[in-house]
């Protein structure tokens, strides 16, 4: 006799926030942008230089999205010309910390064993 699965409501109080978190981290380039921020990128050109394959338009769009979600902080430096800098917000730091077990799992699953901290930093910036 098949076991009876417990039916849970899609409106469970943790479900929407968990689903939203998965959608944020699942968007293309989000991980790369957060890792670049953690590794010290601050200017648009620095992000573009370290993230292979992202277009200027998409990088700009993702930075705006991550700022609106509180993961990236944007600062306007009143110089001539005006400079815009980006940094990892505390929520972005917390997200990267929360993703460390996933990074470890993915390395093990890919057959790389337990990544050394330096290797994890080079691969995903999560170490």
Image: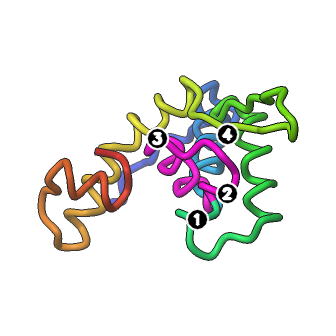
Tag of residue 49:
1
Residue at left 58%, top 37%?
A: 18
Give the quadrant of the N terminus. bottom left
- The answer to which of marks 4 and 3 sits earlier in the sequence is 4
Tag of residue 38:
3
Q: Position of residue 25 (x, y in %)?
A: 57, 50
- Identify the element where label 3 is drawn: helix
Name the front one of labels 4 and 3. 3
Relative to 69, is 39 on the left or the right?
A: left
Tag of residue 45:
2
Determine which residue is flagged by label 4. Answer: 10
Relative to 42, is 81 on the left or the right?
A: right
Name the front one of labels 4 and 2. 2
Q: Position of residue 103 (x, y in %)?
A: 33, 53
Q: Which corner quadrant of the image does residue 69 belong to?
A: top right
- Identify the element where label 4 is drawn: loop
Residue at left 63%, top 25%?
A: 13
Of residues 61 and 42, the one drawn nearer to the viewer in this rendering: 42
Relative to 115, is 87 on the left or the right?
A: right
User: Is 51 situated above or below 11?
Assistant: below
């Amino acid at each position: 006799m098949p076991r009876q699965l417990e039916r849970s409501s899609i409106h469970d109080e943790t479900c929407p926030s968990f689903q939203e978190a998965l959608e944020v981290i699942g968007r293309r380039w989000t991980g790369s942008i957060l890792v670049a921020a953690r590794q010290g990128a601050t200017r648009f050109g620095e992000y573009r230089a370290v993230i292979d394959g992202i277009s200027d338009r998409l990088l700009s769009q993702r930075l705006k999205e991550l700022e609106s979600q509180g993961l990236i902080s944007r600062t306007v430096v009143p110089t001539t010309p005006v400079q815009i800098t980006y940094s990892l917000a505390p929520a972005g730091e917390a997200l990267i910390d929360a993703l460390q077990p996933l990074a470890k799992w993915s390395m093990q699953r890919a057959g790389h064993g337990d990544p050394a901290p330096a290797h994890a930093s080079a691969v995903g910036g999560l170490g």
